[in-house]
Amino acid sequence: MAKKIGWEGVFPAVTTQFKPNFDLDIEATAKVMDGLIRDGVSGLIVCGTVGENTSLSRSEKVAVMEAAKSAARGRVPVIAGIAEFTTQFASEVAREAARVGVDGVMVMPALVYSSKPHETAAHFRGVAKATDLPVMVYNNPPIYKNDVTPSILASLADCETVVCFKDSSGDTRRFIDTRNMVGDRFVLFAGLDDVVVESVMLGAAGWISGMSNAFPQEGETLFRLAKAGRYAEAMALYEWFMPLLHLDARPDLVQCIKLCEEIMGRGSALTRPPRLALEAAERAEVEAIMDKALKTRPVLPDVGLKPAA
């Protein structure tokens, strides 16, 4: 299955849009998705960290999945994030995702509880058994505290539906360690914006990106330049992009990314509590980064990027 999933390129971790009273705004969310696809991204991740998964009810998560399926219209793959407190709850959401008809699921470790390595592996194995959908294992130890090490991932090599690994640890050595253990058993994805070029150099086939919500063409172009080994061109774009990409590595990454998205006219900065709006000094900091980026926004090299039909 790993060879057949066809997941490669930039998959923005799509934001979930809310109304002023914090109700889910499904129409605005669908508009965000369609805009990203029209700008040429390679896929969509919905209900991820940036999509505020754990702030959504079960029915809202399903509604977002359905909106993504409808917005994509088969033009790009749609992967739904699963972030639940127990393996049972995660398995139930995986079955809902299969019913909706998305192309795969991105499974986070069981949240809140800090698990032992064999418990972390058992959680992923349990969810994988609950669905025939391709499963992406999501590792983000700075945020979720449970670390999916290469050895834990390697222990899942016998799970046929576990086909992909998204690493947001920032330690790109893990791509090499994983290949040394299990070869090319898993498709590798970069999960942290500010190490994407290094990740591609070390074998990442895709990039789940936060800041590509605001700059989808720049994100897809950067990825393709790195993939093609056009490093001189990639570095010029990477250096321009880096202050923005660092925002993806902050605890308040969702607020930062949604603010940038709002400045670009692509969505709203509103987040659902407990995430609160950036305080004045932090907002000013992000706005200053955006102001400089827009004043120096580069002409993008040709990488064959074409808007989706």
Image (tube, rainbow, N blue to C red):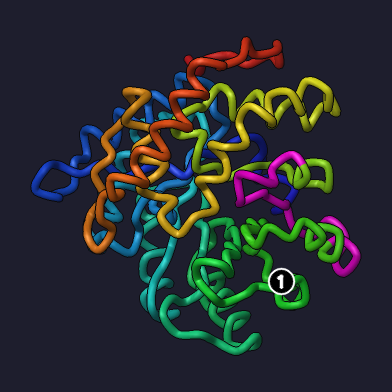
Q: Residue at x 83, y 23 (%)?
A: 232
Quadrant of residue 239 within the rendered picture:
top right
In the shown orientation, is residue 201 left or right of residue 48?
A: right
Q: Residue at x 55, y 73 (%)?
A: 129
| Residue 68 shows in this picture | no
Q: Residue at x 30, y 49 (%)?
A: 278
Residue found farthest to the front: 281
In the shown orientation, is residue 304 left or right of residue 35?
A: right
Q: Looking at the image, which is closer to me, 195 or 295?
A: 295
Q: Amino acid at mark 1?
A: Leu
Quadrant of residue 228 within the rendered picture:
top right
Is 196 a magenta residue? yes
Q: Residue at x 63, y 27 (%)?
A: 240
- Mark 1 lies on a secondary structure that is helix
| Residue 22 shows in this picture | yes
Residue found farthest to the left: 21
Q: Is residue 236 placed above or below 174 in the rendered structure?
A: above
Q: Is residue 170 placed above or below 89 in the rendered structure?
A: above
In the shown orientation, is residue 180 left or right of residue 249?
A: right
Where is residue 215 drawn, in percent x and y?
Answer: 50, 27
The segment highlighted magenta reads 179-197
Is 206 a magenta residue? no
Where is residue 300 drawn, in percent x and y?
Answer: 64, 13
Residue that carries the numbered disc 1 in the rendered image: 153
